Image (cartoon, rainbow, N blue to C red):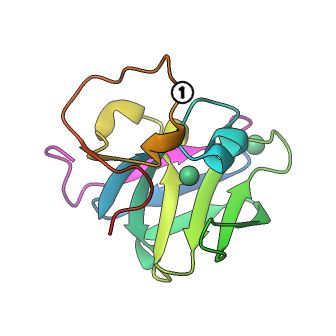
């Protein structure tokens, strides 16, 4: 999280129709290797920043796809209906948090993830540098 405490983050989708501004430091930053995040992003993993919902202002229409977690709870995955970029994620166990997908940040290097989730389905060729807490599925 570095020195960016209290600072604002900006970002948006590939085409620019969905844009957001965040006026808080992230409560957590993590990498998720679960298969659903791999599919949602079309990539090897998803990097997310968790923010208090009321600190995030989003402009532009997102389409929300209701996914289901491995514990059977809904996961609301938000994407731009025009360009298809994955932008947000929400889970019912953290009702006051909105997760922003870090690849959509205007400055994606502004934050560093501190944990990795669902390492059990991480791609075998992936070797990410850095010290992070690693969990085979979800923490505790
Ligand atoms: Zn877009
Ligand atoms: Zn995931």
What are the residue bounds of the magenta stretch?
1-16
Q: Is residue 124 visible?
A: yes
Q: Which residue is mark 1?
A: 123
Q: Quadrant of the C terminus?
A: bottom left
> Predominant secondary structure in magenta?
loop
**Residue found farthest to the top:** 125
Residue at 20% of width from left, 48% of height from top? 4
Residue 119 horizontal/vertical position (percent): 43, 42
Q: Is residue 105 magenta?
A: no
Q: Secondary structure at mark 1?
A: loop
In the image, 76: left or right of 98? right
Residue at 62% of width from left, 65% of height from top? 70
Residue at 42% of width from left, 61% of height from top? 138
Residue 136 horizontal/vertical position (percent): 40, 49
Question: Depth check: 119 or 93 in front?
Answer: 119
Residue 26 horizontal/vertical position (percent): 31, 59
Residue 67's image quarter? bottom right
Residue 127's image quarter? top left
Question: Depth check: 10 or 137 in front?
Answer: 137
In the image, residue 120 sits, relative to residue 87, either above or below, namely: above
Q: Residues within 10 Å of mark 1 (few under 14, many from 20)?
A: some
In the image, residue 110 sits, relative to residue 135, either above or below, namely: above
Q: Is mark 1 within 8 Å of ligand 2?
A: no
């Amino acid at each position: 999280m570095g020195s960016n405490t209290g600072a604002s983050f900006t970002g948006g989708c590939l085409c620019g129709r969905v844009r957001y501004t965040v006026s808080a430091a992230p409560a957590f930053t993590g990498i998720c290797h679960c298969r659903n995040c791999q599919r949602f992003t079309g990539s090897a993993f998803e990097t997310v920043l968790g923010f208090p919902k009321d600190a995030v202002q989003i402009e532009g229409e997102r389409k929300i796809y209701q996914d289901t977690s491995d514990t059977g709870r809904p996961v609301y995955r938000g994407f731009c209906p025009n360009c298809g970029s994955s932008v947000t994620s929400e889970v019912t166990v953290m009702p006051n948090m909105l997760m922003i997908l870090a690849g959509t940040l205007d400055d994606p290097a502004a934050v560093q993830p501190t944990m990795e989730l669902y390492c059990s389905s991480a791609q075998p060729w992936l070797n990410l540098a850095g010290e992070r807490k690693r969990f085979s599925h979800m923490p505790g």
